[in-house]
Amino acid sequence: MFQQETQRVAALINEVLETLGYGRRQLELRPVPFSGVWGAASSISYQLATEQLEAELQPQLAELPKKEAKRLLQERVRERAQAIAEQIAAQLIARDGFARVEAVNGYVNVIFDSSHYANAVIRAVLEQAERYGQGEPKTERIMVEFSQPNTHKAFHIGHLRNACLGDSLCRILRFAGYDVLAANYIGDIGLHVIKTLWCYLRFHQGEEPPRQQRGRWLGEIYAEADRRLNYRDDVVALLNELAHDDQLFVQAIDRMLKELWREHKVGEDIAYLLGQISSGRELKPDAFYDDQTIVAFWPIVGKQLEHELAALRDQQAAEPDNPDIPRLLASTQERYQRWQRLAETIDWWPQVPTWQREVRETFQRWERKDPDFIRLWEETRAWSLEEFHRIYAELDIHFDVWFYESEVEDEGRAIVRELLEKGIAEISDGLPVVKIDEKLGLDKETYRTLPILRSDGTTLYSTKDLALTKRKFEQYGVDRAIWVVDTRQSLYLQQIFKVMELWGFPQAAKCYHLAYEMVTLPSGAMSSRSGNVVLYEDIARQVLERAREIIDEKNPTLPPERKEEVARQVGLGSLKYSMLSRDNNRVIVFDIEEALSFEGHAAPYIQYAHARACRILEKVDALPEGPYTFRDLTPEEINLIEHLANFPNDVAKAAEEYKPLVIANYVYELAKRFNDFYHVCPVLQAEEPTRSARLALVAATRQTLANGLRLLGIAAPDVM
């Protein structure tokens, strides 16, 4: 809105410049730097003065030292700029809609009439309604690839951040005027799928979970598969950690060795290993040649940890003010809990090599397209996809294009052959690779070397991503492609972009990686393998239950079905806003209490501002027609109108920077300014014409809040 007014001022100044014989210029105006005042300032007088004086004084300036010539020019320019500014101001004074026009220090300041400007803002919002803030149509087609969940894994809170970012970005770009395709790339094959299906066939064949639990169940099987296959690594990792960080454990090595010998007659093998531990050397999973040795040794490790815990508790009782003891106690307790989990399945140790061989054999069943295996893959894949579609429907997230990893393997192999034929790729140590830095002629290591196929002909992520990107450019006519992928993939995606550039695709220059940091728990990073993820369906259920409780408290007379609807809007809005209201380059430490907060910088605070505006407007039969008379505007009214005017600019900024956070911050600030206005400025009780003006301001705020929330994928309830 402010931009429209400044464009009008720029056009008028250009008319004046023509009248004064200066000719039209490219003008850049900025807001006047005075609090509580709307207006635009132009420095065109300085530009004109500089041009004139450089021409007039050229012979004189040429004879002076450079520094002195510059000083003389600056002195004269200030005087001339003020004179020109006064000329321009004199011509603008009679124009309609301006409170005053002044020439100050060589600048032309055009101060808008407050009532005129407020009417212009409110009229724009109310007339354009759902289109307020929308940009002009643009010819560029953009594809945003986001979400990208893996089948055979459960959808968790980390996936939610990606999905919310991508969906909001698509909404913002469309609203800004771009032709946008929302794309999802489903990881429906890969080692994680092979591991899950191996574990199913080996330990769960014939089992089938309830329909609504299939995705979760597959995720649990994947976590189990990884625990089984990595069991030896986990055991040895704990031993190495104890050997390096726990002096009491190292000091107890001799005692532990004697106990092993006395109870199990275990000698040379364990003695050698314990010697390695005591000398600080790192153990490897294959260091235990006799499987029974670790089976016998593991209970003794637990006894030692129990002994350390007891000693630390005694020390804490004796030294309650010692600040180191709580930390040591927590660390030892965590290690003991890990030991307990591993002890429950110590019988897995001897079986791990067999299981790893079976997984390799299972992978070969996929490679040769074994019919029975493909049928199982298709059935379990469908279970995951059904869950994904249900979650997307609940979150109101929609995709125009669905890609599947399994569909681009053969295309990828063909692309590798083409890149080899063109000399872009080469064979290095038996692998097809692209030496990107060398091909780009870079001396400094930047993009490194990208393998694009395994030596046995099986595909890599890069094989499939090259095929997928080619599809985007050729099949879908994409001018610009955006990937919403976590920050750990930054180098890899830059490598893909550069290979596409070497391949000759001009669109590669406009490829963009919208990186985001992970979501962690207060206790640390989440991991599908470890099974310590917060599943989306669990957190959504808790949020919706809590939202329903709050709606019951706030509005007990609301009909039950309406309460359910509002609770869903508020609960899901809370989840989405918690993912979008932090910079995507920052880790989100997901705290359920914070996510469920209905105060401050949170979606319910913003939604409640919208509902409050609705409640005010419900009490009038119809919105009075404008124009509206704003008299003696309060600071709260000025701040609110000013923020409404900024919405189109913030939409453009969010689209240009690929940053939904801009809109998340905008709607929060708008809600905050509206609440400030609500508590200071009576609306329904005000006298006319102020009453009508304030009702229009409330209606404009309600509309802009709804528009902004919609760009975040968040509902705007009319009651709460």
Image: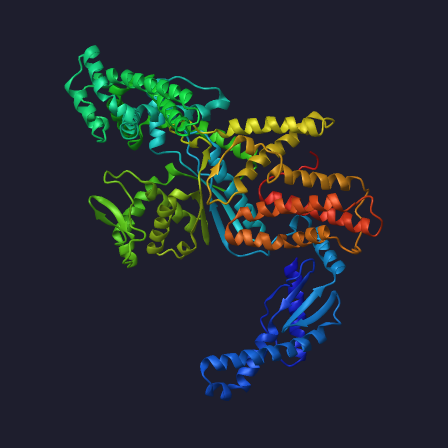
Q: Position of residue 243 (x, y in %)?
A: 26, 28
x, y percentage for residue 85?
Answer: 65, 75
Farthest-out residue, left: 268
User: From the viewer's perspective, is residue 312 above or below residue 514?
Assistant: above
Horizontal side of 560 relative to 530 (left or right) equals right
Is residue 345 visible in this depiction of the protein?
no
Q: Nearer the viewer, residue 237 or 129?
A: 237
The one nearer the camera, 190 or 159, is 159
**In the rendered view of the protein, which quadrant contains the N terminus?**
bottom right
Query: Quadrant location of residue 564?
Result: top right
Colouring style? rainbow
Whether residue 221 appears in this view of the structure is yes
In the rendered view, does 413 fall on the left or right side of 561?
A: left
The image shows a total of numbered marks equal to: 0
Image quarter (top left, top right, bottom left or bottom right) of the C terminus: top right
Residue at the spot 63% in from the left edge and 52% down from the top edge = 647
Residue 127 percent across, percent down from the top left? 71, 52
Q: Is residue 426 above or below residue 90?
A: above
Position above or below: 22 against 596: below
Query: Where in the figure is residue 406, as x and y percent of width and height?
Result: 37, 36
Q: Nearer the viewer, residue 593 or 659?
A: 593
- Of all residues, the one furthest to the right in this rendering is 687
Residue in view at x 28 percent, y 42 percent? 453
